[in-house]
């Protein structure tokens, strides 16, 4: 529980800093934001299904970009320019993981995530594994909630080169394997779509979805937890001091 609280502190701190500096919003985009896909038609289609490779950083960032664009209308009442969209914290955190090298193959035995293959997201990265539950599943829940305006069977994510059974790849598969996470994210989107939704309650729904995503993924990948506890704790302490 202390670990999850610390992780959540990092995410909330990142989001809070972004909102606090809204006047410099154009400088806060995650890396490769402009180069990443901005609409589903930018991805390949097979038999009427969009195919997305979440193990390529720019394709994963495109998932966030589409999600931010499609949810913008629901946050317009809180601030102009999509600045108060609560989902910004997710791509910002993922961008930090990318620039800090946390998505690369941990032992450098392959080129995945390094200079010669810098867009590669390694399935052996604990950070990448956990992020899957904060990117692919929220995106598929948005599809299932009608936010993207397509049917639930029109999106499929590609599996990693190994450990395929530890992830899900489409709406039905994620409902089957990670129903609690899917339901929490759907609750968030359904409340977001209500004309009476307010910012504080949206935060609560997001918090519930975020924490169950982390709780499940941390447990699922205990076998590859890196030596990052101290770094996370230090980050959490620094953020707490900053916001006191």
Image: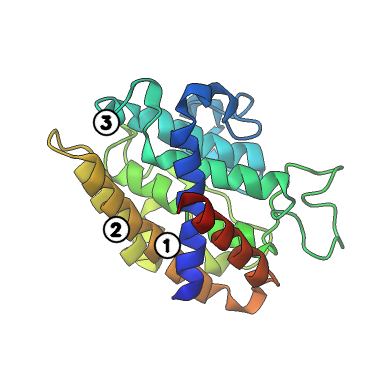
Residue 135 rendering spot, x and y as whole percentages: 49, 49
| Residue drawn at point x = 56 percent, y = 62 percent | 237
Q: Residues within 10 Å of mark 3 (few under 14, many from 20)?
A: some
Vertical placement of residue 183 versus 93, above or below: below
The residue carrying pointer 1 sits among few (fewer than 14), some (14 to 19) or many (20 or more) residues within 10 Å by Cα, namely many
Badge nearest the viewer, 3 or 2 = 3
Asked if disc 2 and disc 1 are in contact, CB closer than 8 Å, the reply is yes
Q: What's the distance in space between the residues labelled 2 and 1, CA to CA? A: 9 Å
Measured in 3D between alpha carbons, the distance from the residue under mark 3 to the one under mark 2, in whole angstroms, is: 18 Å
Residue 213 disc label: 1
In the foreground, 82 or 70: 82
Residue underneath mark 3: 74
Relative placement, left or right, of 190 versus 71 is left
Q: Is residue 112 left or right of residue 78?
A: right
x and y, in percent, of residue 211 in the image: 39, 63
| Rendering quarter of residue 234 | bottom right
Does 159 appear above or below 19? below
Q: Nearer the viewer, residue 237 or 217?
A: 237
Q: Earlier in the sequence, mark 3 or mark 2?
A: 3
Residue position marked by numbered label 2 in the rendering:
184
Residue 74 shown left or right of residue 181 in the figure: left
Picture residue at 60% right of the left edge, 59% below the top: 235
Mark 2 Cα within 10 Å, few/some/many (few <14, many 20+)?
many
């Amino acid at each position: 529980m202390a670990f999850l609280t610390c992780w959540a502190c990092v995410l909330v701190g990142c989001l809070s800093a972004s909102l606090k500096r809204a006047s410099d919003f154009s400088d806060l985009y995650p890396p490769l934001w402009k180069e990443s896909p901005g609409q589903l038609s930018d991805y390949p289609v097979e038999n009427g299904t969009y195919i997305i490779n979440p193990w390529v950083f720019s394709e994963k960032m495109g998932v966030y970009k589409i999600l931010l664009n499609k949810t913008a209308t629901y946050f317009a009442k809180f601030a102009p320019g999509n600045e108060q969209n609560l989902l910004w914290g997710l791509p910002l955190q993922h961008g930090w993981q990318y620039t800090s090298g946390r998505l690369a193959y941990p032992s450098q035995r392959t080129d995945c995530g390094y200079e010669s293959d810098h867009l590669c997201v390694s399935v052996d990265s604990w950070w990448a594994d956990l992020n899957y539950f904060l990117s692919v599943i929220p995106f598929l829940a948005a599809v299932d909630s009608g936010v993207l305006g397509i049917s639930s069977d029109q999106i499929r994510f590609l599996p990693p080169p190994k450990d395929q059974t530890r992830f899900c790849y489409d709406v039905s598969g994620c409902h089957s394997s990670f129903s609690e996470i899917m339901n929490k994210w759907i609750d968030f989107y359904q409340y977001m779509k209500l004309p009476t939704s307010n910012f504080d309650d949206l935060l609560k729904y997001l918090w519930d979805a975020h924490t169950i995503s982390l709780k499940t993924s941390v447990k699922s990948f205990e076998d590859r937890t890196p030596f990052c506890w101290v770094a996370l704790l230090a980050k959490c302490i620094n953020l707490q001091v900053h916001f006191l």
